[in-house]
């Protein structure tokens, strides 16, 4: 009789243990893993790759539901504006922390690996540099510039740059007289981006420009006589790099080669009288600047 009671107690203990294990397993399965965004802004991508398309941008402090993990990427649910609906995507582990863990914000931001260029749509900036014409009869000039860019895709963007500079001109029997040439290029470029690590973003660019040209004589000259340089269209190509100081602000270095020829004329009383020819105004331009992205 006593033995039957002992066996019954053992069976009851086993049953209770099994119930507790099942309850614990069920609890662990229903407990959902979440991550909180610790970067100022973070990209949610279609696939677990920096080259994948961005589905959306989430701000610091946002909590996302996690459905799994692939390497260094969390598979999360990106909430949509329509209540109750979400979009599956991937976010890099360096941009988030699992809810409940003590991760210093500064450390998480320092670990961010994605170039911040991924998050912007528009950008504007100012620059300073110099321009040098290929023809030895022209000098170098200080260049000022302003630019505006618009991102078409994750890899392509359009940039409108306006520049201005002046160079000295040596007297040339087959060209212009001694004076100063002023140029005002308005250039539209298509840029192909190549994101790098540590917040660097490099690019190649090519495009078309319209050059507003002016010329003034120096030295003792007859006031009625002078030279004139026509405005002209030109091509340019080059490249550069952006270094993102933070999510919105970047330092920039840009180099471009400009191919341009413009008609020049001898003038009398500011009116063209005799064509000098098509003069070569091709140049290379180097500039540094600062950009703000939003």
Image: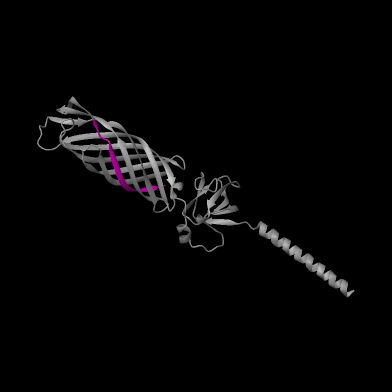
Q: Is residue 35 above or below residue 159?
A: below
Q: Is residue 277 above or below residue 133?
A: above
Query: In the shown orientation, is residue 79 left or right of residue 230?
Result: right
Foreground residue, 83 or 136?
Answer: 136
Foreground residue, 207 or 99?
Answer: 207
Q: Is residue 52 above or below residue 32?
A: above
Q: Residue at x 53, y 56 (%)?
A: 36
Outermost bottom residue: 2
Coordinates of residue 10 in the picture (x, y in percent): 81, 70
Foreground residue, 103 or 288?
Answer: 288
Is-magenta flag for residue 92?
A: no
Q: Residue at x 39, y 45 (%)?
A: 123
Coordinates of residue 258 in the picture (x, y in percent): 30, 37
Outermost top residue: 273
The magenta segment: 279-294
* Dominant secondary-structure state across the stretch colored magenta: strand
Is-magenta flag for residue 281?
A: yes
Coordinates of residue 270 in the picture (x, y in percent): 16, 29
Query: In the shown orientation, is residue 3 left or right of residue 100?
Result: right
Coordinates of residue 109 in the picture (x, y in percent): 46, 57
The number of numbered discs placed on residues in the rendered structure image is 0
Which quarter of the rendered picture does the N terminus lie within? Answer: bottom right
Q: Is residue 258 above or below residue 91?
A: above
Q: How is the image coloured?
A: one colour
């Amino acid at each position: 009789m006593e033995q039957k009671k002992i066996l019954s107690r053992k069976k009851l203990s086993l049953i209770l243990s099994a119930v507790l294990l099942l309850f614990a397993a069920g609890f662990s399965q229903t407990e959902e893993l979440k991550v909180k965004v610790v970067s100022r802004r973070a990209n949610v991508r279609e696939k677990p790759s920096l080259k994948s398309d961005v589905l959306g941008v989430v701000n610091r402090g946002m909590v996302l539901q996690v459905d799994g993990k692939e390497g260094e990427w969390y598979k999360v649910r990106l909430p949509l504006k329509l209540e109750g609906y979400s979009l599956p995507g991937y976010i890099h582990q360096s941009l988030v922390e699992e809810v409940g863990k003590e991760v210093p914000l500064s450390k998480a931001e320092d670990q961010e690996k994605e170039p911040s260029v991924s998050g912007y749509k528009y950008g504007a900036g100012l620059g300073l540099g110099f321009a040098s014409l290929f023809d030895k009869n022209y000098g170098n000039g200080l260049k000022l510039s302003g630019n505006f860019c618009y991102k078409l895709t994750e890899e392509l963007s359009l940039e409108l740059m306006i520049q201005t500079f002046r160079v000295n001109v040596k007297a040339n029997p087959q060209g212009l007289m001694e004076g100063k040439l002023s140029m005002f290029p308005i250039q539209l470029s298509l840029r192909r981006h190549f994101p790098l690590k540590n917040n660097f973003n490099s690019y190649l660019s090519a495009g078309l420009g319209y050059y507003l040209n002016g010329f003034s004589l120096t030295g003792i000259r007859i006031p009625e006589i002078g030279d004139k340089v026509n405005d002209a269209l030109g091509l340019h190509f080059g490249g550069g790099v952006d270094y993102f100081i933070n999510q919105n602000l970047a330092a920039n270095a840009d180099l471009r080669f400009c191919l341009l020829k413009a008609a020049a004329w001898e003038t009398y009383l500011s009116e063209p009288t005799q064509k000098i020819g098509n003069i070569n105004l091709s140049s290379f331009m180097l500039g540094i600047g600062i950009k703000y992205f939003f």
